[in-house]
Amino acid sequence: MSESIPAADTLSRRTFFNGTAAVAGVGGLVLGAGGALAGTAAKAPAALSDVDLMAQRATLSYPFYGGHQAGIETPPQDHLVFTAFDVTALTAVELQLVLAKWSAAMAELTAGAPVGKIQPEREQGIPVDTGEATDMGPQGLTLTLGFGPSLFDERFGLEKFKPLNFADLPAMAGESLNPALMGGDLCIQACANDPQVAYHAVRNLARMARTAVRTKWTVLGFGRASAGAAQSTPRNLMGFKDGTRNASGGVDFDEHVWVGDEAGQPWMVGGSYLVARKIHMLIETWDEDPIGDQQSIFGRDKKQGAPLSGTAEHDVPDFHATVDGTPVIAADSHIALAAHENNNGLKILRRGYNFTDGLDSVGRLDAGLMFLSFQKSPEQFITLQRKLGSSDRLNEYIRHVGSGVFAVPAGIPAAGSYYGKEFFA
């Protein structure tokens, strides 16, 4: 955040970020430089050098303001920091200030700007911004905010704003959930092309709200496991291409991702529901499984990603194809159970990331998939997971250890507003 930016009419930017202003002034705040953010950078010419390509990735930015939050339809970036928070504030006014401060800071961070002074003039001064992302550029950073079901309890008087049928996910087969990796009043999904930029964003948001929120659980993803428009399909840590038949913009998003009037809350129109599942993979066991069994479990060829009934990744699977009376794609394979053709057309947007946390308590690799999905209703995920949890052959090699569901509000249309403003009118 530059010192050359003028103060807002009724509340200075420095005072706002330091959290010393009265909430009564929040509504008049001009939320930084985000309204002038650049759009998605053009595809790099083939002649660019590696240095030029890195520079282009560094300057890539996505608009912060708009009808939908960024980080959903945005092409998945390379790195993730997902964090869930519990609100420790005692009053609605404190919560309001956190949401307003975060919204303003998000606009600055996604533009590649700091959230305050990195080097105070006085030696005794404490930096407002921690500084580790200085001069690194926006790196395609997106910050996506969600509200957990627990936020709408009696603490802050928000019960009347709770979306219809919005509750914690029910218990399902295939789970071994760790209570320390469940739920949260708030969540932030930070995605960027550089891990330090994503980490810096979450670190500074948590820091500026440290008297009002407490970090509950967090996952760092080091490689995307889904593809957006014009992106090649990446691989999960089992070595298979992940998300080949993902929801893909346009009609898919209108029908399966963006919330309409069904939530019963105007603030959710244009939003979505985020499901977060930390999935531990039994890597050592999987690595000893023969390739034929691995491919049968997924229903796909490992190298090309083609369905076993086809020859190319994007061939439409033929679930009726047989050889000597045996289905080519097993009915309990992952692809067969998840396919929209076998689920009354149901789709979700997968936006997951690979993760590793070193070794577990018995010396095995602690790694897997941070599964993130966006959908118009949590029931879409519940329907699929109940089916997968009870029948998927992949369950022999995975355990769901973390879980959360969050209502992701619509985007902020323009500077001067903030997430959750409707709650405090």
Image (spheres, helix red, strand yellow):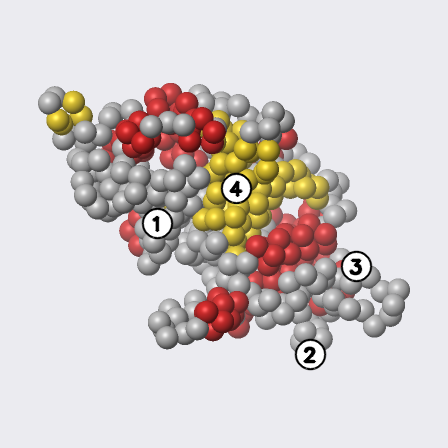
**In-front residue for pair 248/421:** 248
Closer to viewer: mark 2 or mark 4? 4
User: Which of 370 and 416 lies nearest the eye of the viewer?
Assistant: 370
Of callouts 3 and 2, the N-terminal one: 2
The location of residue 332, given as percent across then percent down, is 29, 24
Q: CA distance from mark 1 to mark 2?
A: 43 Å
User: Is residue 93 shown left or right of residue 413?
Assistant: right
Q: Is residue 376 visible?
A: no
Residue position marked by numbered label 4 in the rendering:
355
Up/down of 404 relative to 312, above or below: above
Q: Earlier in the sequence, mark 2 or mark 4?
A: 2
Q: Which mark is residue 4?
A: 2
Q: What residue is at 58 percent from the left and 42 percent from the top?
A: 219
The spot of residue 333 in percent (x, y) is: 29, 28
Residue holding disc 3:
20
Q: Earlier in the sequence, mark 1 or mark 3?
A: 3
Q: Nearer the viewer, mark 3 or mark 2?
A: 2
Q: Which residue is mark 1?
A: 233
- Amino acid at the residue labelled 3: Thr
> Residue 328 at what x, y percent from top left?
19, 29
Q: Secondary structure at mark 2?
A: loop
Name the residue: 49% across, 36% down: 368
The amino acid pointed to by label 1 is Thr
Secondary element type, mark 1: loop
Q: Pointer 2: residues within 10 angstroms few (<14), some, or many (20+)?
A: few
Mark 4 secondary-structure assignment: strand
Q: Is residue 149 above or below residue 107?
A: above
Q: Considering the image in quadrants, where does the N terminus appear?
A: bottom right
Q: Nearer the viewer, mark 1 or mark 3?
A: 1
Residue sticking out furthest to the bottom: 4
Q: In front here: 84 or 397?
A: 397
